[in-house]
Image (cartoon, helix red, strand yellow):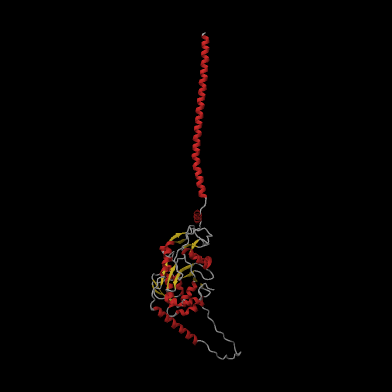
Amino acid sequence: MNEARVEHRSLLLVALLFIGFSLLGFVLQGCQNGSSSSENESLASVTNREATPALAQDATREESITPTPTATSSLTNVYQPVWGTFPPPSIDPATPIPPPLTDIELSDEILVWILLGTDSEPPFAGRTQAIHLLFIHPRFSKASLMSIPGNLYVYIPGYTMQRLNTAYALGGIETLRETLAYNFGITPSRFVLAHPGDFQWLVDDIGTIDVTVFYPMPQACGGIHAGQVTMDGSMALCYASYLEGMDEVSRMSRQQQLLQVIFRKLTHDGNLTLLPLLYASYEGWVKTDLSLLELMAHIPLALKLADPDRISYYMIGEDQFDLWEVPGYSQAQVLLPDQESIKALLQQAIDDVMVPAPLTNQVQTLEAQLTNAFLATAAITSTCTPTETSTPELTATGPTQTPTLTPTPTPQGYP
């Protein structure tokens, strides 16, 4: 009886244990399924959160990729080269290329000429160590002369950043005109280029010049003292071309001084009657696109410009550039231009010729001197005209004598 109870109790315990393990398994499975579903929900929510910005970014990206007229124009402007419509450089520049100088206000009435002096004799081009822009207003009879240092470091279109004085040697007057148009916003319509011998000849042909030297130059040209100095062609050439270090400002001042003295001597005492003879003498040596007829037509204007204070003088000086050493082993120094300062100075020189001013009585004096010189020359020419005479018969009694021609000395370097 007791054994039966014990066996029945054991079976009941086993059944309870089985039921307990079964319930525990269901509970565990339910917890596991719950955690899996919650994890899936969490992963789904995270995925949705991550996918939503991505889709938004893709949509935004598609909108940004979609071109609009404004976006296209802005992209075009970003990739526009700094040199614009000018020829691109063929050599990498030593310093960044500046943009072209623009917005110079220049009236159509103003003539723009360029006066150049090279340091080499023909047929070599050489460097232009004298560069002078000339603005002329014929109706107002006024002019401005702007001197530019040759060592100014500028962009030469189609080449690279280089000294301005090399532009003519690299491509002639057209390259120089394009260089001036890029860096100064000015394109000269006429040019005159003189070699050293041409300048020396001119001073000798007009009979020396008297120059007031403000600072003595004992180390140059055999020594030049301060005060009034009478210069022949050789000394005037040395005075105009001498350069001490990088002091181009002093050299430009001396060149302007000589141009004033030479112009004054040509326009006084009727010396402009020599113009046809001088033009014929230098034709083939001096390079220019000015014809003799054009120069003769400007004689009345030249007499008016000889009136005091009709010509203003400017120069690109120390306020318009900085001294800079070119990278590399050469240690060469150049002058980096300040574009805004140069633009302001150019505009001032141009505006100056736009202000009318009355002429003095000196113009009438110069006109009278020129008229008297012309009449005197015409009288001499008519007196010296040979008349027809009978030709004597020649006999063979002896050798015929021929006149001996003494050659005219030419400056060194001329053929």
At x 39%, y 78%, the residue is 362
Up/down of 98 relative to 288, above or below: above
Quadrant containing the C terminus is bottom right
Pick whichever, 27 or 404, lies toward us.
27
Give the image quarter of residue 247.
Answer: bottom left
Percent of width and height locating residue 171 = 53, 66
At x 49%, y 85%, the residue is 381
Q: Is residue 21 left or right of residue 251?
A: right
Pick whichever, 342 or 358, lies toward us.
358
Residue 230 shows up from this direction: no
At x 52%, y 20%, the residue is 19
Up/down of 329 relative to 391, above or below: above
Q: Is residue 16 left or right of residue 349?
A: right
Pick whichever, 2 or 257, lies toward us.
2
Percent of width and height locating residue 343 = 43, 64
At x 50%, y 45%, the residue is 57
Residue 33 shows up from this direction: yes
Percent of width and height locating residue 139 = 43, 74
Percent of width and height locating residue 218 = 41, 69
